[in-house]
Amino acid sequence: MSADADDAILVCRDLSYSYLGRFAALDGVSVDVRRGEMLALVGANGCGKSTLLKVLDGLVFPDSGTFHAFGQLVTEDNLEDEQLSAAFRSRVGFVFQNSDTQVFSPTVREEVAFGCLQLGLPVEETRERVGDVLAMLGIEDLADRAPFQLSGGQKKKVAIASVLVMNPEVLLFDEPTAALDPRTQGWLTDLVAELNDAGKTIVYATHDLDVLRRIATRCLVFSEDHRVLRSGPPDEILDDTDLLLRANLIHAHAHTHTGADGVVVHSHPHTASGHHHG
């Protein structure tokens, strides 16, 4: 697949990153994120997916390699420039895997307003935006509740609202469906598809193979040695059993059978819980 320089809005070249200087998380990773695509970062736990999302959000900076966003080089020094930082922060939004790390204000309404006020938006505009996004996600009734009183699914909706209210061009999701009940998972995959239809560029990390056909136009498969094994459309990736085995996304004894939508492979059973790098 050829990447046109014109429509690549996030461009990573040869990124390497290690935690504490010795736990490798990314090793020579290059990726172009194109305007309007839904890119799934797929791989076993600890392969570097979450770390790449953090680079794309300017939360960590590579030890080597470069990251350009919207034509600008993103470095720690550059993001100290208030104007550049505000422009970048308003265009890229990150929904973390664990909503508790993201949701911290006294009420849901204040939580959702926080980012807009941080970026210096007028109070009246912020109030309107908050009302709109609460209505869009169907959580107006939670506006005056304290986040700690909410269920996991409700917290996830609030975390998403606090990002959507900024109206970013690019939305990053880390394991979006992890630890959610099936109904909320379905709601979330539908929402991601709707946001993409509305013109948002989506990048998300997952090892849930079941969501790929629904919410990916392209997949980037990571190996457990923190490199990119393959990039391609979901059908091509899901039909390549050898690739999925090499990426440790399925077990060798997982039997495959053909379903209505092609080959169905039993996903890797280990979950997204537990402490891991990457």
Image (cartoon, rainbow, N blue to C red):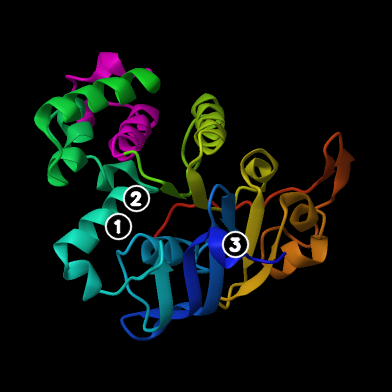
Q: Position of residue 248 (x, y in %)?
A: 67, 65
Is residue 40 highlighted in magenta? no
Q: Is residue 275 visible?
A: yes
Say few, some or many: other residues with alpha carbon within 10 Å of mark 1 (under 14 / 14 to 19 / 20 or more): some
- Which amino acid is tagged 1? Phe
For disc 3, the marked residue is: 43
Q: Which mark, residue 241? A: none
Q: Position of residue 198 (x, y in %)?
A: 51, 33
**Residue in the foreground of this view, choosing between 240 and 74:** 74
- Which amino acid is tagged 2? Arg
Q: Nearer the viewer, mark 2 or mark 3?
A: 2
Q: Is residue 84 left or right of residue 183?
A: left
Q: Give the quadrant of residue 236.
A: bottom right
For disc 1, the marked residue is: 88
Magenta region: which residues? 138-166
Q: Residue at x 66, y 54 (%)?
A: 218
For disc 2, the marked residue is: 91
Say few, some or many: other residues with alpha carbon within 10 Å of mark 2 (under 14 / 14 to 19 / 20 or more): some
Q: Residue at x 58, y 53 (%)?
A: 39
Q: Nearer the viewer, mark 3 or mark 1?
A: 1
